Amino acid sequence: MTSHSNDPRAWQRPDDAAGRPASASLVDPEDDLPSANYAGDFETTAIPHYDSNSGAPVSTGFGLLNDPEPLPYVQPGGRHALDYSAEPAGIGPDPFRAAPERRGTLDLGLLLLRLAVGALFIGHGLQKAFGLWGGPGLGGWEAELSDMGFRYADILTYVGAFGQIAAGVLLILGLFTPVAAAGALAYLVTGVLAEAMVAHEEARLSDFLTDGHEYNVFLTCAVAALVLTGPGRYGFDAGRGWARRPFLGSLGALVLGAGAGVAIWVLLNGGNPFA
């Protein structure tokens, strides 16, 4: 049990007049401050280094005012020593990163669809351009366009025949697929509208899909699907964005192709397919 004195004099500095024992040693922090008549220079006063191994002082020191004395760092040893060395750690999977894209057989299916549609376009184009496989040739193809009421049939003959061949080749190669598919879609939309108007004049519009016209309708849907899905990885467009992740560009190509087919029919045939 510790007792404390309530006498305030017990907490005061002993007065020299009261007398102190000769063995008493009192240290006052104020005694370390220089007096007004001190002629020394703190700038040149230095605390010497001591070598930790030999204990001998070295010449380099630390100034009292300008150079701060470095903090002592104690290195623990013995049984209290700890190993602070960094160990290589394995980097695990990032839970916030998307999983690798797995497409399975999707690209193989797109390749098969491209080959089928491209081969059909090339075959029909060769029939119209060179009369192969019982085709009409350029002369017969121009006569067919004139019979359907198209103006500038001589120009449309070359555009339609060689455009089919070019679109088919690009689809097979998977090169510039949105442009090729949009051109093929425009050709097919124009052809479907022409057949629909002929069927309307012959009062057979109700039998349009069951009277041999379903082939062109199905082919139109297949080309539209290629516009929306992209060509896949098996083609020259594999490194482009529309090959694997088509979005706004493919929607624009779809609208452009369908709109161009309607515009060709309206402007060059003069008929309104929606009337």
Image (spheres, rainbow, N blue to C red):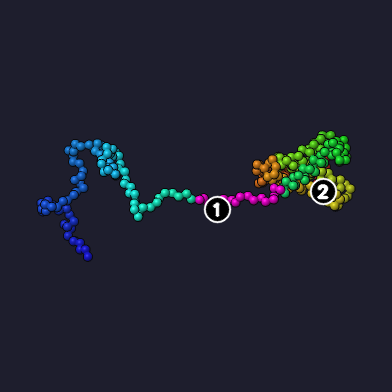
Residue visible at 85% across and 49% down in the picture: 212
Pick the quarter of the image with the N terminus: bottom left
Amino acid carrying mark 1 in the image: Pro
Q: Amino acid at mark 2?
A: Tyr
Q: Which residues are magenta?
A: 90-108
Position of residue 266 measured from the top left corner of the image (x, y, whole percent): 80, 41
Question: Can residue 260 be seen here?
Answer: no
14 within the magenta span: no
Query: Which of the pair 31/102 is nearer the observer?
Result: 102
Q: Is residue 103 above or below residue 158?
A: below
Q: Residues within 10 Å of mark 2 (few under 14, many from 20)?
A: few
Q: Is residue 100 magenta?
A: yes
Q: Which residue is mark 1?
A: 95
Mark 1 element type: loop
Q: Position of residue 253 (x, y in %)?
A: 71, 43
The local secondary structure at tag 2 comes to helix
Q: Residue at x 42, y 49 (%)?
A: 85
Label 2 belongs to which residue? Answer: 215
Residue at image coords 50%, 50%: 90
Number of marks in the rendered image = 2
Horizontally, residue 97 falls left or right of residue 131, namely left
